[in-house]
Image: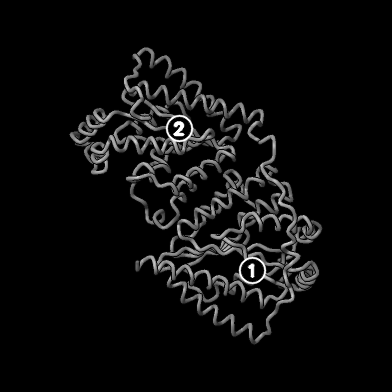
Amino acid sequence: MLREIDLDKKLSGKEFKEQYDSLCEKLSAMQREVRKLKIPVMISFDGWSASGKGTQINMLLQALDPRGFTVENISHKLEHDEALHPYLWRFWEKTPPRGEIAIFDRSWYMTLFDEDSTNEQAARHIREFERELTDDGYVLIKFFLHVSKKEQKRRLEALEKGDATSWRVGKHDKKQNKDYEKLCAQYASVIQSTNMAEAPWTIVEAEERKYAAVKIMGCVVDRLQLAIEKARTKTQIPATPQFRSIGSNDILDRVDLSKTLEREEYKDRLEKAQAKLFTLQNEMYRLRIPLICVFEGWDAAGKGGAIKRLTRRLDPRGYNVIPSSAPNDIEKSHNYLWRYWTKMPKAGHMAVFDRSWYGRVMVERIEGFARPDEWQRAYQEINDMEKQLADWGAVICKFWLHIDKDEQERRFIERRDNPQKSWKLTDEDWRNRDKWDEYVKAVDEMMVLTSTAYAPWTIVEANSKYYARVKVIETVTDALEAAIKRKEKECNS
């Protein structure tokens, strides 16, 4: 594919000035519309070394108000935190809020373009990343700047001779030129496997900088014009739902809530489980295994108490507890998964989510905070995210703390009458009881559609707080112990 591209395309100085000036004027006006309509835009520049990415980014920026864009320079060398997180974590962190433009000098494709062979798992994760963003209204514009082997070599030699630019040429760049023919086929394969209708690639003939600049500017103008028209007519909302009812499986109705523990057995098993988890925490740090614990459940089901017992004996430097309340203005301006991606644990650390991304298919669904097309597609988006985390090596434990309606009422009254606990009870808690049956249906569907081999749900019988707390910790220790054994086996093989 790349070998067939005509790289001799040029523009005269007069043609360039006329077209570039006109495009700059259009793009400037479109940036204002993008901000007004709250359209988030991501523009990525990939391509051969010395193909002129920096120059082209600079020419594009001449038309833009600097208060409405950021430029992200993606380095080959990972910073410490980046190396300890999933690959896409640093790109989720850099996704722009609605109405702003983020420009990437090299992008999430770096791992595919830099490796000797195509990594299908990484390609799949990238397609999922882009689909999640474009489904949520993001505009993704992807450029690959293409030059010939001869032109690349000429530019690299010119850079190497300059006192101020010689540092920009490294072994990687020279090797790329040496392996140009082989890499042509690899890069073409990457582009073809990730060229989606909602996030297409544009190959830019970059031998002549004026031609490349006009082509890039024209593509950005066309894509933004289309996005603006869609936003004005709201045609980005699917006309038909993506979700199909799975029917009731009565999962919660089948839970045996009579399970309990006597106090002495509770104290004994809790102490043993906490001591074991403390030992495993050191092992997971040594082996750099990340642990993610998700707590969902009914109001007053005992999530806080279970989390407190789970973390009580642990080194506090190795875990974070992340409560999830209603999103603030900054969080609302991003994709709903952004605030969770940015809080994922480092390798060897533990993150405990007190409520989580599953709010999308429960409270946001039931209260109407998410449109039907948004919560319906969230099941797949959540599965994709959790699969990416599992592929990274994370242990994922998801708990639904289940109590019956009578037990919830008893706990509500106890909280109401206890001055030290009354702050926990709100009018919203009482209102939510009126929608109990709607939540049962939503939880039922959530369990079926998002309980996977790599991130299974554990239903915790929580009418007995003693039983629930022990079950949570023992479930975590079992999962973590199995992961440690697998990791040690891999290290020794």
Are the residues at dot 1 and dot 2 in contact (C-beta closer than 8 Å)? no
Please state if 208 lies on the left or on the right of 371 as rendered.
left
Please state if 295 lies on the left or on the right of 299 as rendered.
left
Q: Amino acid at mark 1?
A: Gly
Q: Nearer the viewer, residue 19 or 454?
A: 454
Residue shown at the point (38%, 36%) measured from the top left? 46
Residue shown at the point (57%, 75%) measured from the top left? 474
Residue extending furthest toward the bottom = 264
Residue 400 in view: yes
Residue that badge 2 annotates? 201
SS at badge 2 = strand
Mark identifier at residue 304: 1
Residue 387 pos. (x, y %)? 52, 54
Residue 306 pos. (x, y %)? 62, 71
Residue 68 in view: no
Residue 138 pos. (x, y %)? 55, 37
Residue extending furthest toward the top = 14
